[in-house]
Image (cartoon, helix red, strand yellow):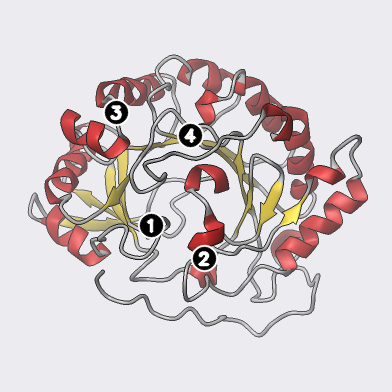
Amino acid sequence: MGAQRPPCPPPYPPPRRGEVGVGGAPRDLCGRTVTYLRVSVTDRCNLRCRYCMPARGVGFLPASEILRFEEIAQVVRAAVGLGITCVRLTGGEPLRRRDLGHLVALIAAIPAIGDLSLTTNGTLLAGQAAALARAGLRRVNVSLDTLDPPRYAQITRGGDVRSVLRGIEAALAAGLDPVKINAVAVTGAEDDIASLGALSRSRPLHVRFIEAMPVLGPGSLGHLTAERILEILARAGDLEPVSGPVGSGPARSFRYAGAEGTVGVIAPMSRCFCDACNRLRLTATGRLRPCLFSANGYDLRPLLRPRSDDAALRAALVDAISGKPPARPDEIPHDTFGSMCQVGG
């Protein structure tokens, strides 16, 4: 499936458990300061993307097992006390969750939250972008792998790309900034890369191409390397390296001459960036995962029901940060991973 990813050794001498880093936040055992929390608000999705969910689908959870908005806000408040400043809402498809603007408003009201964003497939965004912006959402990432309607329907098992394009325009009109487009780059997607990259020329859109990770099992996808993606993009014009927009994380960003937006590559397979990982993930059921590809986690739901135990919640967060592994496992645990909609994209 292409070049093997390089090893990811810990870059720092291990600090003592609970040792603090930037801003007084606890550091993990590799010296990384965790400042970013990804929150899945639902495991449900209205698409069945081939790289995310098996063809047979997955069994969605009953509402009683999903964290309530007030419980999510309680976790965020505790995390902010430990140095978390950035929160991203994910799913499943987060816009499937009713009254999501209420959660956005709860989180936006928490002092010290410097960045509140959303990842969505965009199909429901046109009708919600303005209200979410008013509630306090700052920016949005839209997952979009192709502009070709038949190919989009094939990748998503039935989706309509026109609804995504309407959602992107609504996000721009609502003042969400930056608006990013995330595309998974797989074998055979060369034409899609070129057409998506062209969006950055005339619109203030930031298009990032992500190396595919085989989360559904070995050989489930053939991935294009970041260098191959850049070769395809460079056919349309010279690419100037630039600083990425807010929240660029591990992306390398570039701009075509005169373009309003940027293009970028994210290379989890060929250029491991685990040594700079600053995030935790909270699943919709309340399980805190220090690493996307680790089966280890901390169940926070018993600490929130029937009433919140703030001290225990804080201790669990400290343990999760301290227990963050130095790198993803050599082999992705497909038997325990589930799907991205269950873990939180």
Tag 3: amino acid: Gly
Query: Judging from the image, what secondary structure is the residue with disc 3 in?
Result: loop
The residue carrying pointer 4 sits among few (fewer than 14), some (14 to 19) or many (20 or more) residues within 10 Å by Cα, namely many
Q: Residue at x 33, y 71 (%)?
A: 270
Q: Secondary structure at mark 1?
A: loop
**Residue at position x 42%, y 21% from top?**
124
Q: Is residue 309 above or below residue 97?
A: below
Left or right, 111 with reference to 162: right
Q: Residue at x 91, y 35 (%)?
A: 307
Q: Is residue 332 visible?
A: yes
What amino acid does circle 2 point to? Pro
The crowd level at tag 1 (other Cα within 10 Å; few <14, some 14-19, many 20+) is many
> What quarter of the picture does the N terminus occupy?
bottom left
Q: Which mark is residue 158?
A: 3
The image shows residue 12 at horizontal and vertical percentages of 61, 82
Q: CA distance from mark 2 to mark 3?
A: 29 Å
Q: Mark 4 highlights which residue?
A: 139
Q: Secondary structure at mark 2?
A: loop
State which tag comes first along the sequence, 2 or 3: 3
Tag 4, which secondary structure?
A: strand
Q: Quadrant of residue 197?
A: top left
Q: Is residue 169 left or right of residue 87?
A: left
What kind of residue is marked 4? Arg
Mark 2–mark 1 Cα distance, whole angstroms, equals: 25 Å
- Kind of residue sitting beneath label 1: Ala
> Could you tell which of marks 2 and 4 lies nearer the N-terminus?
4
